[in-house]
Image: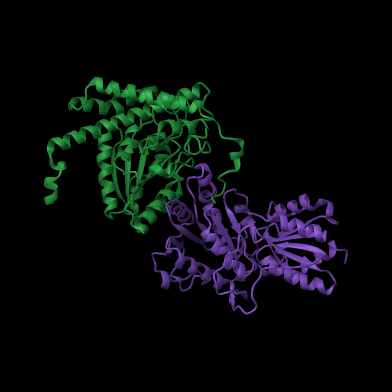
Chain colours: A green, B purple
Amino acid sequence: MTAMVEDGNSNPAANQTQDSEKWIQMYRQMARIRSFEKKVNDLYLNAIMPGLAHLCIGQEAVAVGVCEALTTEDYITSTHRGHGHCLAKGASVDRMFAELLGKTSGYCRGKGGSMHIADPDSGNLGANAIVGGSAGIATGAAFSAKQMGTGQVAVCFFGEGALGQGLFYEVMNMAQLWNLPVIYICENNQYNEYTHFTEATAGKILDRPRAFGIYTEEIDGQDVRVVYETVQRLVERARQGGGPAFLMCHTYRYHGHHVGDIDRAYYRSKEEEQDWVSNRDPLRIMGNWLIDQGIADQQLLEQIDVEAKEEIKAGAEFAIDAPYPDQSEVDDHVYAA
Amino acid sequence: MSTQPDNVREITFGQAINEALAEEMRLDPTVFIIGEDVAEAGTPFKVLKGLVEEFGTERVIDSPISEAGITGMSVGAAMTGMRPVVDIMFGDFIPLTMEQMVNQAAKVHYMSGGKFNVPMVMRTTMGATRRSAAQHSQSLHALFSHIPGLKVAVPSTPYDAKGLLKTAIRDNNPVAIFEDKMMYHLKGRVPEEDYTIPFGIADIKRQGGDITIVATSSMVQVSLEAADMLEELGVSAEVIDPRTTLPLDKETLIESAKNTSRAIVVDEGYEGYGVTAEIASTIADGAFYYLDAPVRRMGAMDVPVPFSPALEDLTVPTPQSVADMAKLLCGKV
């Protein structure tokens, strides 16, 4: 404690500056993700990107708030709607785009694509195209962190649709039984693809993890500060041996299930969509708060947006110009040496 | 033929498995066992007896009855520095693990462009005639053998069981090893010193010149008995054991069939779309101009395994049925 007095961290002014930088960084990360996703949509509409992608526009605060509370060494597993998680955990824009376009310089040499980005350097154990498919992997990563005493924490991102999968309940049971440092982040964007979650979910969601004795919290997933501060507590708790937690984040995906899901009136109204965009947008909520607090002004926020767009533009150009894999790579990496 | 000195001790197939695990766990602290009743119970087959006493419950872990869950967790543990050995009590339960094995374990290395490895082993069982009925008797190794990214071993002797399991544990890929539960008490010579058996290398269990019998797992023992019966009739059968169905040592099988010009493939999995089909087609492709007869397949009958002994025994190849098929192909009927 004596040492702390000498430490710069105990200086309130220095703390405030650090905090301000942290909040601005979170805004910047959200702006990068949104800009990235808009570009992905453009690449799809212009037939430059093969296949489809699942955009996370509207859900940026969950990805950023969670990942900012983690160290690089901490693990995440992601979902089919995972670009935001990957970027927030430290992936670079150019190699992300390259993967989406199936290029050799992509994170997975073009073999994974939009739904399978994995990056050991940033602790990303991979996005997963099987709904709920990564629950075992995240829990297993937490198991090895505990066995090896590394102090790492594993975060499992999943949508509320994954709550229909049995695997989840098997691994939550073991996580609690063995007190594993894993945090289950439920991104409740309300829609299991094209079906409102209430049509597919009996009982109360949080009663499910609670049945195993897992600690639960429920928050507004549109406020990045709330997400960050909550997850910071849960991570610290897990690191100290407090065991698993389940965090439900209420959020909303502005776009369809995937980029091609344009006509959505049969499962949700335009009014509902507009209400979230107008009143619960994570960038606007954070931007307004930064201005209210005097941490940023409109000009700074605009500058951040411009910088993000420039980075995204350059990253996409890099990917478009990058070479495709040589045909000889098709049967590389089936087996590890 | 496997080169083994004559003076080595005899142990059972089950003891060989136990020794392989114990030795690898002593060598590598990242190896651990997880499964249902693996610790104090040592599994219903008692194959793991004594391991928890040596390695403790931290490394020999009794799990809930959650085959998919323990498989999925093992994938994650394997990706992050450990070497899990998952115990799936009956091979009939591997359908419960399919999603994690087929979509996760098998694909992680490829989908990540080679950046993540999944060095895990799934030990499970196979084999009928134990009067255990349709959900505890199947030989489902063909299911995993269908999936690129997985490796599949099917040992037929104590020596092979130990060497293949040690190789599996050291392999950087997901490996499924199918142990015929009817062979756990089979005795055989196993050296005390450390050895491994490379995957994808078939073993000629018996040399012969008139007909090739390719057999897997306990069907090797069945085929060796058939070969003894054939010898009395003056037919010299060569018995070849691929030892792993994935990777498959095509070359050795084809070469043998070229020499004998006749081949039978015997495997305890269902015959339809099975291991026998893959191997028979391999031989037909590779040895076509040398063959004097069509390659014949002998798998388990394509019915759910019945309970009644009177019916169950009809469903799997026997020394007599293999010998009869060989006689037919060699014109000795």
Query: Could you tell me residue A16's position as x and y percent?
Result: 16, 35
Instruction: Give the camera-side residue of A245 and B173.
Output: B173
Quadrant location of residue B4?
Answer: bottom right
Q: Residue at x 48, y 24 (%)?
A: A43
**Residue A124 appears in view:** no
Judge from the rendering whether residue A311 lies leftward or rightward of residue B234; answer left or right. left
Quadrant location of residue B241?
Answer: bottom right
Query: Could you tell me residue B229's position as x and y percent?
Result: 79, 73
Instruction: Give the camera-side residue of A329 and A102.
Output: A329
Examine the rendered structure and indicate whether residue A245 appears above or below residue A65: below
Q: Residue at x 45, y 26 (%)?
A: A316
Q: How many marks?
A: 0
Examine the rendered structure and indicate whether residue A301 appears above or below residue B205: above
Quadrant location of residue A217?
Answer: top left
**Residue B80 appears in view:** yes
Query: Could you tell me residue A253's position as x and y percent?
Result: 39, 30
Instruction: Give the camera-side residue of B31 and B146.
Output: B31
Query: Could you tell me residue B281's position as x and y percent?
Result: 74, 51
Judge from the rendering whether residue A199 lies leftward or rightward of residue A215; answer left or right. right
Q: Residue at x 65, y 78 (%)?
A: B6
